[in-house]
Amino acid sequence: MSAFHLTVRLPEPLRNGGDGMIAVDEPVASLGELAPLLERRIEGFRADDELYNFAVNGEMILHGERATPLRSGDEVEILVSFSGG
């Protein structure tokens, strides 16, 4: 059985002086399972905050789609939501 590995890219406000990448080696099946893990590892991040969205392998995931499946090798990006008027 091969090891599980995801890469998570962070936006500037969440980098806290780091390089903006987090390796996740704990198996997670969906964004919903990944979110609490990220909350524990990223200071100031709350997955239910509408300020943040996700992209998986470059595909934007809407805020409520936490059942989106994840596979080893995927790249997840946390994106800052923008709004305008």
Image (spheres, rainbow, N blue to C red):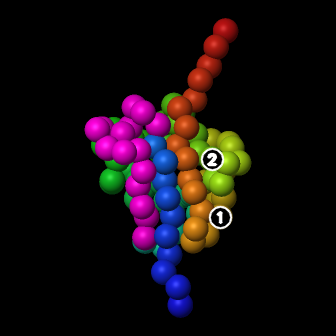
Mark number displayed over residue 56:
none
Q: Quadrant of residue 36?
A: bottom left
Per the image, the residue denoted by label 2 is 55
Q: CA distance from mark 1 to mark 2?
A: 12 Å
Residue 66 position, x and y percent, is 61, 54
Callout 2 environment at 10 Å: few (<14), some (14 to 19), or many (20+)? some
Check the image and report above or below for 2 versus 46.
below
Residue 80 position, x and y percent, is 53, 32
Instruction: Specify whether 42 is left or right of 47.
Output: left
Q: How many marks?
A: 2
Say which amino acid is labelled 2: Ala
Q: Nearer the viewer, mark 1 or mark 2?
A: 2
Q: Nearer the viewer, residue 58 or 68?
A: 58
* Residue that protrudes farthest toward the bottom in the picture: 1
Quadrant showing the C terminus: top right
Q: Secondary structure at mark 2?
A: strand
- 6 magenta-colored: no
Residue 29 in view here: no
Q: Are marks 1 and 2 in contact (CB under 8 Å)?
A: no
Task: Give the residue displayed 49% in from the left and 48% down from the top.
Answer: 9
* Residue that protrudes farthest toward the right in the picture: 59
Per the image, the residue denoted by label 1 is 69
Q: Secondary structure at mark 1?
A: loop
* Residue that protrudes farthest toward the top in the picture: 85
Task: Give the residue displayed 36% in from the left and 39% down from the top.
Answer: 15
